[in-house]
Image (cartoon, rainbow, N blue to C red):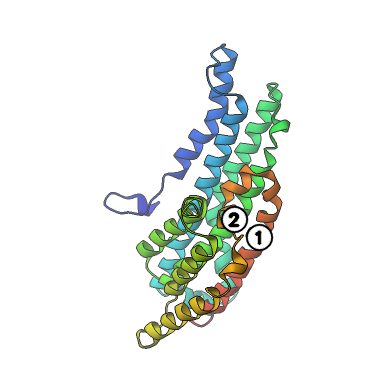
Amino acid sequence: MARKAPGRTGGYPGLFWAAIALSLPLLHQALVTYRLDFLPDRRSSLELAGFWLIGLTCLRACMGCAASMAEEVQHHSAQLVRQLPRSGGMMGLLMTKIAVTSLPIVLEWALFGGLIGLLWLLGVPVQDYNPQRFVAVGLTSMFFFSSLGLWIGARLGDPERAVNNARVAVIMTLVGWALLEGVLKGPLLLIAALIWVAFMFRSSPRVASAFQGGVISAVVVLLLPQAYMLGDLRLAQLSPLMAAFHPDLTRDDCVLYCVGAVAILLLNLRQLRKL
């Protein structure tokens, strides 16, 4: 909330836009009731609300956790938490930040579930639209991007840079890969993503250049000769929007989000214990 003060950047009015997303199906139903059905079918408004909420969820989870964790590192609060008794240690700190950031988002998805129930009571065949895929993708992607945001914040240690990088990571995952795959192949995009990850590592000034240069060189040397083996790689299919749009991708992508979130949490925990 403090980041929304005048003159500061990084705030995101997610609650307002979430309320608009949840009101779209109700507005459509009201127009249908008054015989003003000039919009597409009701399925389109419900799916638009689901896609809208998924995008908001990813942005708010990643940006909120990144800013919060960067402030902890910047003010050296993480080291203090590690020394306090009964604080839960670093894992307790990480899980608390995920819980605090996720609470309003979970409430919004609960309202989405209530909206589905209300439309069903009004006679809308929502069960034919498979709305549970939006909830599954929204909650699992929230877990993944919360973990990613914590990792970005811990690596950078600066709230503004962390928010900006978190925003870039979310936008690239949601729509960036799909747009770039129109001109570049998946293996090249993967190389670019790994190079970006290498630059995210925080090292001491003496070894930073050598470390990042070594990682980038290793990535290029290892992946370029094997690019033909990754010719069918489609990073756009990892997007939460794509997972919700194609029901055949929903289960696999949700499992991947959970596995990725746990892996990032463990990596972040190992790094924070070295602070």
Relative horizontal placement of residue 116, taking residue 152 as reference (left or right): right
- Residue for point 51% across, 74% down: 81
Q: In this picture, is 215 found above or below 253?
A: below
Residue designated by label 1? 256
Residue situated in front as seen by the camera: 91 or 138: 138
Secondary-structure class at tag 1: helix
Kindly report the distance in space between the C-alpha atoms of the residues bearing marks 2 and 1.
9 Å
Residue designated by label 2? 238
> Which residue type does callout 2 highlight?
Leu
Image location (x, y in percent) of residue 188: 49, 65
Q: Residues within 10 Å of mark 1 (few under 14, many from 20)?
A: some
Relative horizontal placement of residue 92, taking residue 177 as reference (left or right): right
Disc sitting over residue 30 in the figure? none
For this orientation, the residue located farthest to the top is 35
Of marks 2 and 1, the one in the foreground: 2
> Which residue type does callout 1 highlight?
Leu
